[in-house]
Amino acid sequence: MNKNLIIFEKEETSQEIIKSYLAEIPDITIEKIFTEYPAGVKYAKENKPKLAIFAMTSDKTASFKMIKRLADFGINVLVLSEDYTTANIIQTLRYGAKDFVSKPIIKNEFIQSVKKCLAEEVRTMKKSQIISVYSNKGGVGKTVVATNLAVELARLTREKVLLIDLNLPIGDVTTFLDVKPSVNICEIANERAVENVKGACRQYKNSSLYVLAEPPYMEQSKMLTASQVVKLFDAVRDLFAYIVIDMGTNIDKANITILEESDVILLVTVVNLPLIRNCQRCLALFANYNIPADKTKILINRYLDNDEITTEDVEKALNKKVYWKIPNNYYTIMSSINKGIPVSEVNENSNITESFSQLASTLIENLFEKELS
Ligand SMILES: Nc1ncnc2c1ncn2[C@@H]1O[C@H](COP(=O)(O)OP(=O)(O)O)[C@@H](O)[C@H]1O
Ligand SMILES: [Mg+2]
């Protein structure tokens, strides 16, 4: 079995530590150590070692690009980095790294990881994750959740995120983010040509977030059919790492298709009896359509700590754990909606911005856990 490896590491002391730890693993060959990373990537392409141990540099973007190239060559990449925040770990994995070890290196952890990376074949990650935001009632906060979650996903990962307004015929994502698209989603879905779809997705300010929505109040605006939904998703899947859907309230064929195609469904509710009953009905209906139960996550919006109905009451009624709670924050939300900006732009430090930011990172983490299990 090929047990050849190369090392990307600029610091000499760190190189020495890595070499001394590797000396404890039998039968491996260190082919080369690179301080000039591009030369290492070129070498890897030609020589195809089994493993590349890659110490991230301060230039993260360049590091991610190289990790991706190495993974694309079919080389297992073990990333070392001082930044072991969830966001960084997840990003390295998304770019195709096989494993992640934090610096300063802990010997046992490192040796175990090297052994694992030498043993396994390269795993390929799914290209994109679809997150749908649903409720069969209006006014519960679907659009608030979908837009702010999409903004936070883009901020956190810096990867391309697409927010699609499928609350047809008249959605309001364009108002919430003050964007001015000029497309007819139905036509786009029919054509499916990737270039057309790409052109129709509007970049949101200078971020990695894109928005696909119809111009508001277009009279000829129609609903999508189930087959148009599939076509649309096929076209955008390869272009974006995360796709967030603001859905309509109907339970029709098109919406069921969206739910089936999604990796996660955020079922939004507010804590009051009629809405919780509705939620129960939704869950029963999803079960009828054989939508896996673990795909649906309950999100309570407008949460108040001192509410008469507690989270435990909700969980009992739904026979399901509550996944997330977005606090009630009338002032920040109204200011955000009236100005057409996400809550993070109204107040970076508000409890609601914090909640959306944590929701984004928890969701990504859970999606990865699911994929890796
Ligand atoms: N977390 C929140 N705190 C306070 N008010 C909220 C919150 N989320 C939503 N709202 C209010 O609820 C209204 C409806 O939200 P929206 O996202 O448009 O619902 P939907 O898309 O489900 O119809 C908003 O205009 C806002 O006034
Ligand atoms: Mg809405």
Image: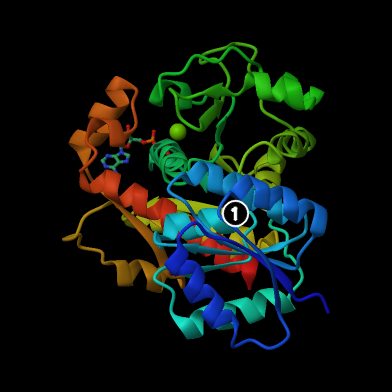
User: Looking at the picture, does residue 116 appear above or below residue 264?
Assistant: below
The answer to whether residue 43 is left or right of residue 158 is right
Of the pair 209 and 189, the residue shown nearer to us: 209
User: Looking at the picture, does residue 304 appear above or below residue 240?
Assistant: below
Of the pair 221 and 266, the residue shown nearer to us: 266
Q: How is the image coloured?
A: rainbow
Say which residue appears at 51% left-offset and 68% top-offset.
Answer: 15
The answer to whether residue 144 is left or right of residue 279 is left
The residue that label 1 is drawn on is 94
Q: Position of residue 347 (x, y in %)?
A: 22, 35
Q: Secondary structure at mark 1?
A: helix
Instruction: State which quarter of the image contains the C terminus.
Output: bottom right
Residue type at numbered disc 1: Arg
Count residues near mark 1 (Cα–Cα under 10 Å), then give few for <14, some for 14-19, many for 20+.
Answer: many
Q: Quadrant of ligand 2?
A: top left
Say which residue appears at 70% left-offset and 41% top-offset.
Answer: 237
